[in-house]
Amino acid sequence: MTDSNVPRFEKSGLSRESRPWGRQVENLLKQLVRDSSRSGNSDLNANKTQNSTMAELSNQIRAMPIPVAAYTSDTGFSLAATRYFQVTIPIPAGKTSMTLTAIANVAALDATSGGAAVASASIEVGGSGFLHSSPIVPASKDAGASAVNNLITPAMGFQQAGLIPGSNLSVALAVFATNGSAFPARSQNYATLTVSCIFFD
């Protein structure tokens, strides 16, 4: 509403005695209309500022890096065949790049060959359109009186762009031996795989 929409007391049919009151009412209505207009504009500007601030804050939150960690372990296995220990990591929405670090620890007991057989391990990271592999790491040998413990610590780290949000990363530790029969299932055999990722735009 504007001043021009305020009813005019001259057209109201008021008696001469009532016209001063009518003029007061008309002036009061005009003032209320002007105040309402100023308040509306002020609220509109405040809402625009608030919306802009919230949009900027939302953009900043979306741009923040997202750290993700995953872990798996197993014990008591044999190396009669290649053993795989795997974790799956979803790529967060809006993130297309990452840095990744993976480290593993393996111990496998050579129960029969006296140290002639060798266990080894490597880490592979695969995603949509890429595959990274660590070098194959042979075991160091912890010689015992009647058996030889094979200790392996493979690790890798890299950066990757071009990720597809919503798809998955697969990180696998592969453990194998030159003579698998020398590594039967033993309770002290163990493997751990720890993966740390930071996803960003």
Image (spheres, rainbow, N blue to C red):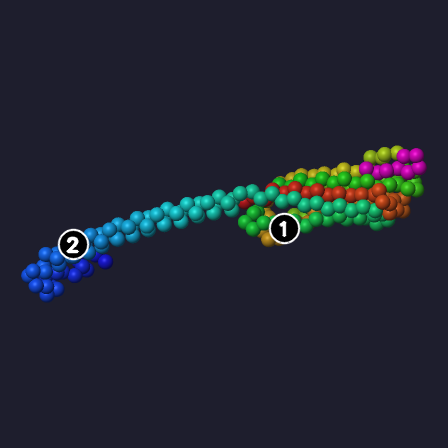
Query: Can you say whether 113 is above or below 5 in the image?
Result: above
- The answer to whether residue 138 shows anywhere in this view is no
- Please state which of residues 196 and 45 is positioned toward the viewer in this rendering: 45
* Sequence-first tag of 1 and 2: 2
Separation (CA) of disc 1 from disc 2: 67 Å
Please indicate whether residue 37 sits to the left or right of residue 165 in the image.
Answer: left
Could you say where residue 130 lies in the image, as x and y percent from the top left? 65, 48
Circle 2: element type: helix
Q: Which mark is residue 10?
A: none
Residue shown at the point (75%, 39%) measured from the top left: 154
Residue 90: give its label.
1
Callout 2: 10 Å neighbours few (<14), some, many (20+)?
some
The spot of residue 96 in percent (x, y) is 57, 47
Point out the stretch of residues depicted in magenta: 144-151
Task: Where is residue 132? Give x, y as percent.
Answer: 69, 44
> Type of residue at label 2?
Asn
| Amino acid type, callout 1 | Pro
Q: Quadrant of the C terminus?
A: top right
At x 63% / y 51%, what residue is drawn? 90
| Residue with the mark numbered 2 | 27
Q: Residue furthest front?
A: 17
Contact between marks 1 and 2 (CB within 8 A): the answer is no
Q: Nearer the viewer, mark 1 or mark 2?
A: 2
Whether residue 45 appears in magenta in the rendering, the answer is no
Place residue 119 in its image quadrant: top right
Q: Quadrant of residue 182?
A: top right
Give x and y (percent) for residue 64.
Answer: 53, 43
Instruction: Tell me, yes or no, whether the highlighted magenta stretch contains residue 145.
Output: yes
Q: Is residue 49 left or right of residue 148?
A: left
**Residue 113 in view (yes/no):** yes
Q: Is residue 140 above or below residue 23?
A: above
